[in-house]
Image: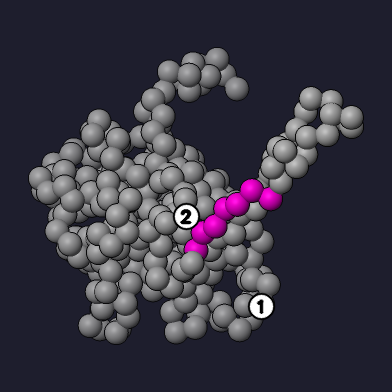
Amino acid sequence: MTTGLIEQLRAARVYDLEQPRYSGMPIYPAHKPGYHYALHRRHRDAYKPAENGQRSGASGMLTMMEHTGTHIDALCHQACDLKLYGGVPIESVETAAGFTELGVEHIAPIVTRGVLLDVAGWKGQNPLPRLYSIPAGELAACAEAQNVEVCAGDVLLVRTGYGALWSDEAAYLDSAGVSKSGSIWAGERGVAAVGIDNMTWDTPGERDPESGSLLFAHVYLLPRKGVYIMENLNLEALAHDRRYEFAFVAAPLKFTGATGSPIRPLAMV
């Protein structure tokens, strides 16, 4: 590693884009109960001076759904007409123990340019109206106003302002999202992944009149375009400092055959 790169890393401002995980955090209804952590061994249980001297230890057990908290969707998470990305039929790869192809363990660590489109800030509405659907035209206009361009290979992050409501599940689940046209706009730009400060990227409850599908991006970006979706990001500090371009770093855990994974995404400027 060059000295110059080390110095750049040391000088960089790092933004932590993960929301805190805890019992009672907002969870999409299909993924409830979703999250539980409890201590399995406590320090008093392990404190045996005759055997270990002064040392004691504690450890816990974590039970959670893949799609809770800040996470990334694997390509096997969604299918279109029972086919995964690349036309892979689900019956050829879906098993009780997970997927033999396109599982989350195949997502390489993401280290690339990130772009934030702070739509809520640009429109002067923090947050955007409940269940508001951001169209392609507004994504393009926001990018122009911020003087940024969304390019192939980028990670595109969209701020609705609902990340600030993480402690209020009822309000958070009625968040704004990205419309069908907005998802197509992102896919056409060849982004590597998209991310948002809501539960679904899509606008909750919005149905595509042509396909009849809810969550249009989940039937378009994942199985058709091969674009990963990250949800429940905290974009508040990044937006506050008007950091619209940055180095983006994130890596899923290697859960073999899994449909998603928690992540801790970082923006570095």
Q: Position of residue 265 (x, y in %)?
A: 45, 43
Picture quadrant where residue 175 is located: bottom left
Q: Identify the residue position indicated by label 2 in the image.
A: 23
| Start-end of magenta stretch | 34-40
Q: Is residue 263 visible?
A: yes
In which quadrant of the rendered image does the N terminus lie? top right
Nearer the viewer's eye, disc 1 or disc 2? 2
The residue at the point 17 percent across, 62 percent down is: 130
Residue 13 horizontal/vertical position (percent): 39, 25
Alpha-carbon span between mark 1 and mark 2 = 30 Å
Give the quadrant of residue 213.
Answer: bottom left
Q: Quadrant of residue 14?
A: top left
* Furthest residue toward left: 124
- Residue flagged by tag 2: what amino acid is it? Ser
> Which structural element holds mark 2?
loop
In the depicted view, which residue is nearer to us: 15 or 219?
A: 15
Q: Which SS type dominates the magenta stretch?
A: strand
Residue displayed at 20% across by 65% down: 131
Mark 1 in CB contact with mark 2 (< 8 angstroms): no
Q: Can you identify the residue that label 1 sits on?
A: 95
In the structure shown, which secondary structural element does the residue marked by tag 1 occupy? strand
The residue located at (38%, 53%) in the rendering is: 232
Q: Residue 33, percent across and down? A: 48, 67
Q: With 258 as the anchor, is 79 left or right in this view?
A: left
The answer, for residue 110, to whether it is visible in the render is no
Identify which residue, 44 or 198, lies in the foreground: 44
Query: Reading the chain from its start, which is encountered first: label 1 or label 2?
Result: 2
99 vs 262: above or below: below
Q: Would you say 15 lies left or right of 170 here?
A: right
